[in-house]
Amino acid sequence: MARKSKIDIPAVVIRNGILCFIILLFVMWVWKSASNFLHTAPIFRIEKVTADADVKFLEARLSGKLRGKNIFSVDLKRLHREIRAIFPQVYDLSVERRFPDSIHINAKRRDPLAQVLADDASYLVIDDEGVIIAFAQKPVEKYPSIIHAHIGKQKIALGTRLATQEIKSAITVIKAYENNNTLSKYPLSDIDVDNLTKIGFKIGPFLEIILDNEDISSKLDMLVSLIQQKRLDFREIKYIDLRFKEPVVGKK
């Protein structure tokens, strides 16, 4: 039987192999040492949490949770999800590390615009995009109420958007009303959007205004002109219907 030939490995190959192994061990040691330094060095302990001017309230809310932690140990994606879940009024949100010792929150705040009367008689506080930012068991007096919004089986949860045409029309009415310098001085309430060809809302406690879903801003300008020209006494008027070429004034 023929003898197996002996494989001779050149010394240079062995030497290079040992050298590579030593370099690998050194790199691993450097990596571990660097990682240990980054996760334990006092310089990387979070000292402050900062936030954009629009969401300054987040600084106090998050400082207690994050202060003293290592900046590299904070899971930014998880923190982002937690902020979104707890603070639905926040949007355009991003969280970033600012080395060596701070976390910064970039975000904007949704401001309440109105409240929607839900089927269970609770109230959903929404912003100007129809996003739910709070729940209330009783009406909040400073926000106009939207009734007959036809929410139906739409998901009701903080942070979700109510996208019915009724909600959109009500928001258009509210924004146009608030942007009108003359009308915005009077309290607006009870925007009834059950029928978009006959949208009704109240100015003050008694006067009802009726309009449709077309060219709302112009119709409100017509109302302003009517008030200024005829100097109407709201106490004597039951309603003003703006759906026609000439406003219809209904007396009590």
Image (cartoon, helix red, strand yellow):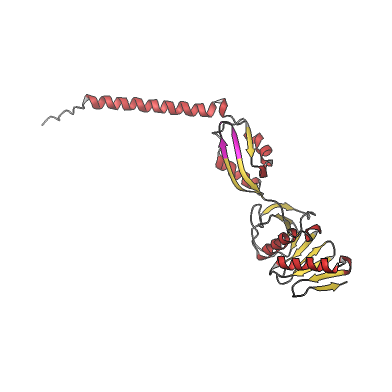
Q: In this view of the protein, can residue 151 be seen by the observer?
A: no
Q: Nearer the viewer, residue 1 or 15?
A: 15
Q: Which residues are magenta?
A: 96-104
The residue drawn where x is 84% and y is 62% is 205
Give the percent coordinates (x, y) of residue 178: 74, 58
Q: Which of the two residues, 175 or 45, is positioned nearer the viewer here?
A: 175
The kind of secondary structure the magenta stretch mainly shows is strand
The residue lying at 80 percent from left, 64 percent from top is 202
User: Does 39 sit left or right of 212 as displayed?
Assistant: left
Q: Is residue 197 above or below residue 172?
A: below
In the displayed structure image, the side of residue 22 where residue 244 appears, left or right: right
In the shown orientation, is residue 91 left or right of residue 10? right
Is residue 228 visible in this depiction of the protein? yes
Image quarter in which the N terminus is found: top left
Q: Is 4 above or below relative to 184?
A: above
Q: Position of residue 72 (x, y in %)?
A: 54, 33
